[in-house]
Image: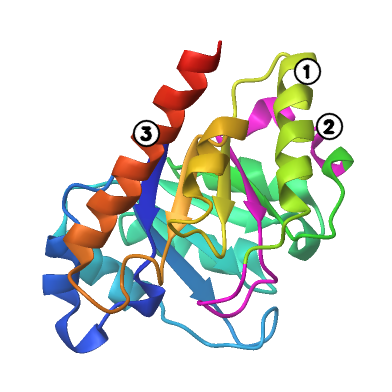
Amino acid sequence: MRLAPSILTADFLNLGAAIGAVAQADEIHLDIMDGHYVPNLSFGPIIAKAVRKATDLNLTAHLMVTDPDFMAPWFVEAGCSLVVVHAEASTHLHRSLQNIKSLGAEAGVALNPSTPLDVLEYIAHDIKRVLLMSVNPGFGGQLFIPAIYDKIKKLVKLRRDWNCSFEIEVDGGVNLDNVGMLAQVGVDIAVVGSAVFGPGEPGERLQQLRHQVTESQAHLERRK
């Protein structure tokens, strides 16, 4: 399972150093909030461009916004290789995904905790990634919602039944206590925010999470 640090909880006064500290991550996650779709305002494409200059890692723009079609081009231009839009915010989801791909980026879909998986059925072959929110979107540092484990397992089965290849990502409340279980139930990428950019050195905290993933997956293999 890959790890994607979210810079939402990083030290923005020293953002370049914070990104450098997690250079061993698999990608960087950008939480874009507009203060309307979610009750928080984060940052825009200027910050995304600065992050692009600070790292060679792939950037994912997670658009928690009311008008993803309007904002998506900004973040593709800023250097994001994957743009994820919320199914709940897209009036015409298939069109939104096609628009992103026409800009030269990969497209993904995010689902809030209470959103059913069946909204994916007719666009499942058109997406690079499904992002399952394991907290209600809007703020970092929230507690993981346990019901999402079952949702992950159902999505893994649906991916197989639909003969799809999209990646499964989880975002919200991921930490040392649950990152191993997420790896075991089939998550491909976990977004890590406060668990990395909290007290202590971000690079060390990232390595602790990676070690937990490795140990958990090794344990799973021994049980087979």
Residue holding disc 3:
215
Where does residue 159 sit, x and y in percent of width and height?
Answer: 71, 23
Which residue is depicted at the point 66% across and 59% down?
134
Where does residue 45 sit, x and y in percent of width and height?
Answer: 37, 72
Mark 2 vs mark 3, CA separation in Å = 34 Å
Which residue is depicted at the point 27% across and 55% down?
206
- Local crowd size for mark 3, using a 10 Å CA cut-off: few (<14), some (14–19), many (≥20): few
Residue holding disc 2:
121
- Local crowd size for mark 1, using a 10 Å CA cut-off: few (<14), some (14–19), many (≥20): few
Q: Nearer the viewer, mark 2 or mark 3?
A: 3
Where does residue 37 sit, x and y in percent of width and height?
Answer: 70, 78
- The stretch of residues the image draws in magenta is 119-143
Where does residue 9 sit, x and y in percent of width and height?
Answer: 38, 78
Residue 162, which numbered label?
1
Residue 94 appears anywhere in the view: no
**Magenta stretch contains residue 66:** no
Q: Please, what is the three-letter code of the amino acid marked with disc 3? A: Glu
